[in-house]
Each structure stands twice: as structure tokens, then as C-alpha cells.
């Protein structure tokens, strides 16, 4: 995975809450046997001429701004792949007192695939939405801020997820960092010994 430290790019605002994974990538496309070709299918079934991502201001955007509970519904890494392959490096959702920014499964799939998910409270999120599609923003993961129109909007993130994204490590890469300890553990146990 590519490490994520800071990223500056245009935002694209897709309003609406509870956007499920079937809207992000329809289920009929999950039978594709490769891990590529999903970017052009992002929001396939709802992407008409009026859809926010089809507007000129959203062209070339790399930061997706969405509502609450984004990625709810069934679990599919394909939703994350579609977002990434469409050119987005980060997704920014709105967190409320009654709703998280993302579903738990989508959050874990994104972390495993190297897609940064940011949650902002209502007021900060509204500033991004007000800036509108096409506005430039900078996401600074080490310092946990998004800067738009000269204003820094702080965000919280799980430290383990943050560390893995900054270092560009997926679950396998994170595990391999403990290779010597795992090998030493296996040498101490008969269960891991090869038959003679």
C-alpha cells in the first residue's frame, strides 16, 4: 500500500446519509475475477447526468465528502476498491450523536485497503460541504487536520489505523513486522514442528 501522510486535492461532495455498499458498487459487479476495473463502476446505478460526481466541479477530485453512515449494508471490499480506483485518496463523512460516519465493516475494509476515512462533527463537516465540489483541501494525517479555505478542521482517528496508513501497511505487512517474534514463538512449540 502507498503510505498516506498529507494529500492536497479537490473535493467532491455527494450529499445524503446511509449510502450503502450496493449503491457504491452494485452487487452484480462482484463476480469480476480481477481486483481492477471497479473505478468506472462507482455509483453505477445512480450516476445519471445530475449525479454530483458527473458535474464539472467534481472532475479530478480526490477527496470524497459524504453524509453519515456511509458504506452501510453488506460487506464488500469492492466498494473500497471502486472508490480508490476512481481516484479518491480519502473519504470524509459526518458523525452525529446518533450515527457514526461509517459502518464498522466498511471502516475495517477501508483500513485494510489503505483508504483513509475521516469523520467530522456536524459543524466542521458543514464547512467542507459549503466549500463545495471543486474546492481544494489538504488532509494531514500525522497532524489529524483537514484544511479548507484557510481553516484547519481537526479530526480523531484510531491510532493503530493511523499508524498503518502512515507506514503503508496492510494486515499482512503489519503481521510481517513481527516476523522474528513469530518465528521464535513457533520454535518453542511442538505444534509447529515438522514431522521427522
Image (tube, rainbow, N blue to C red):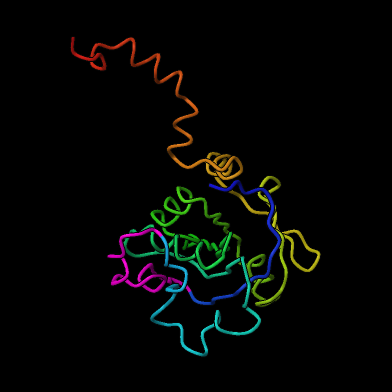
Magenta residues, start to end: 17-35
Where residue 146 sits in the image (x, y, percent)? Answer: 70, 59
Q: Residue 89: within the magenta?
A: no
The correct choice, above or below, for 158 with respect to 55 in the image is above
How many dots with numbers?
A: 0
Q: Nearer the viewer, residue 52 or 99?
A: 52
Q: Nearer the viewer, residue 116 or 34?
A: 34
In the displayed structure image, the side of residue 25 where residue 120 appears, left or right = right
The quadrant the C terminus occupies is top left
In the displayed structure image, the side of residue 24 where residue 154 appears, left or right = right
Where residue 113 sits in the image (x, y, percent)? Answer: 47, 51
In the displayed structure image, the side of residue 84 where residue 60 appears, left or right = right
Where residue 3 sits in the image (x, y, percent)? Answer: 60, 46
The correct choice, above or below, for 78 with respect to 22 in the image is above
Q: Residue at x 69, y 65 (%)?
A: 9
Corner quadrant of residue 7: bottom right
Corner quadrant of residue 117: bottom right
Q: Residue at x 45, y 47 (%)?
A: 112
Where residue 183 sits in the image (x, y, percent)? Answer: 39, 18
The correct choice, above or below, for 56 with respect to 128 in the image is below
Amino acid at each position: 500500500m502507498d503510505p498516506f501522510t498529507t494529500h492536497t486535492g479537490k473535493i467532491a461532495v455527494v450529499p445524503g446519509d446511509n449510502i450503502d455498499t450496493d449503491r457504491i458498487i452494485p452487487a452484480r459487479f462482484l463476480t469480476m475475477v480481477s481486483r481492477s476495473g471497479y473505478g468506472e463502476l462507482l455509483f453505477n446505478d445512480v450516476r445519471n447526468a445530475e449525479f454530483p460526481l458527473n458535474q464539472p466541479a467534481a472532475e479530478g477530485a480526490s477527496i470524497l465528502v459524504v453524509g453519515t453512515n456511509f458504506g452501510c449494508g453488506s460487506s464488500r471490499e469492492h466498494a473500497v476498491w471502486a472508490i480508490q480506483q476512481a481516484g479518491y485518496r480519502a473519504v470524509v463523512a459526518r458523525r452525529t450523536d446518533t450515527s457514526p460516519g461509517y459502518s464498522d465493516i466498511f471502516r475495517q475494509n477501508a483500513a485494510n485497503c489503505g483508504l483513509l476515512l475521516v469523520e467530522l462533527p456536524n459543524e466542521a463537516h458543514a464547512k467542507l460541504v459549503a466549500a463545495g465540489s471543486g474546492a481544494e483541501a489538504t488532509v494531514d494525517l500525522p497532524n489529524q487536520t483537514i484544511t479548507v479555505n484557510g481553516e484547519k478542521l481537526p479530526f480523531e482517528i484510531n491510532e493503530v489505523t493511523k499508524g498503518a496508513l502512515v507506514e503503508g501497511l496492510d494486515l499482512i505487512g503489519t503481521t510481517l513486522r513481527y516476523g522474528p517474534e513469530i518465528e521464535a514463538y513457533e520454535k518453542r512449540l511442538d505444534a509447529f514442528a515438522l514431522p521427522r
